[in-house]
Amino acid sequence: MLFLVPFIGWLCSGIIKYCVNTIRHGANAKHMVGNGGFPSTHTTVAVSTTAAIGFSSGVNTEMFALGVAFSFIVILDATGIRRALGDHARNLNEINTSTGSQLNRKHRESQGHTRLEVLGGIFVGIVVGWIASVLLNNI
């Protein structure tokens, strides 16, 4: 059943993200679904799996250590590389606008995450991992 944890984390994070976007953007919320935003779904998926392993198997296991390393890489990617990609897209959009470019394609600027969005993903991931481990131990 542990293999379901990342999917449950993804679903929970997506629902929360949609609710947050609805509050912030109203009817335009469906256009905001994708990379970026609160909470970080990538972080939630990685951390929920790692947390479930830690809660069910213990933190002194090889699998938990591997999960922590994987989660760390995902978090660095979300706050670093993908955020830089969003900054790059914003600059390209500004150049296209200022030069009167005929390109009809607007680059998506919301790619990476702020620290708060990643912390939200970590929190949701730990909660999902804990609930999953409690349910798995009671089955």
Image (cartoon, rainbow, N blue to C red):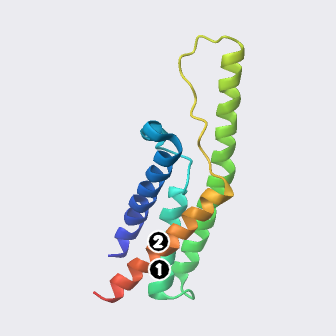
**Numbered mark located on residue 53 in the image:** 1
Category of crowding for the residue at label 2, using alpha-carbon neighbours closer than 10 angstroms: few (below 14), some (14–19), many (at least 20): many
Type of amino acid under label 1: Ile
The relative height of residue 94 versus residue 8 in the rendered view (above or below) is above
Mark 2 lies on residue: 49
124 or 66: which is nearer to us? 124
Where, by quadrant of the figure, is residue 79 drawn?
Answer: bottom right
Where, by quadrant of the figure, is residue 76 drawn?
Answer: bottom right
Could you tell whether 127 is left or right of 115 in the image?
left
**Numbered mark located on residue 110 in the image:** none
**Image location (x, y in percent) of residue 119:** 62, 64
Q: CA distance from mark 2 to mark 1?
A: 6 Å
Q: Residue at x 61, y 70 (%)?
A: 69
Q: Residue at x 38, y 65 (%)?
A: 8
The relative height of residue 14 versus residue 68 in the rendered view (above or below) is above
Q: Residue at x 51, y 40 (%)?
A: 25
**Image location (x, y in percent) of residue 19:** 45, 52
**Image location (x, y in percent) of residue 91:** 71, 29
The relative height of residue 119 versus residue 84 in the rendered view (above or below) is below
Q: Residue at x 71, y 12 (%)?
A: 99
The relative height of residue 87 versus residue 99 in the rendered view (above or below) is below
Type of amino acid under label 2: Thr
Do the CB atoms of the residues marked 2 and 1 lie less than 8 Å apart?
yes
- Count of marks, rendered view: 2
**Image location (x, y in percent) of residue 86:** 64, 39
Mark 2 lies on a secondary structure that is helix
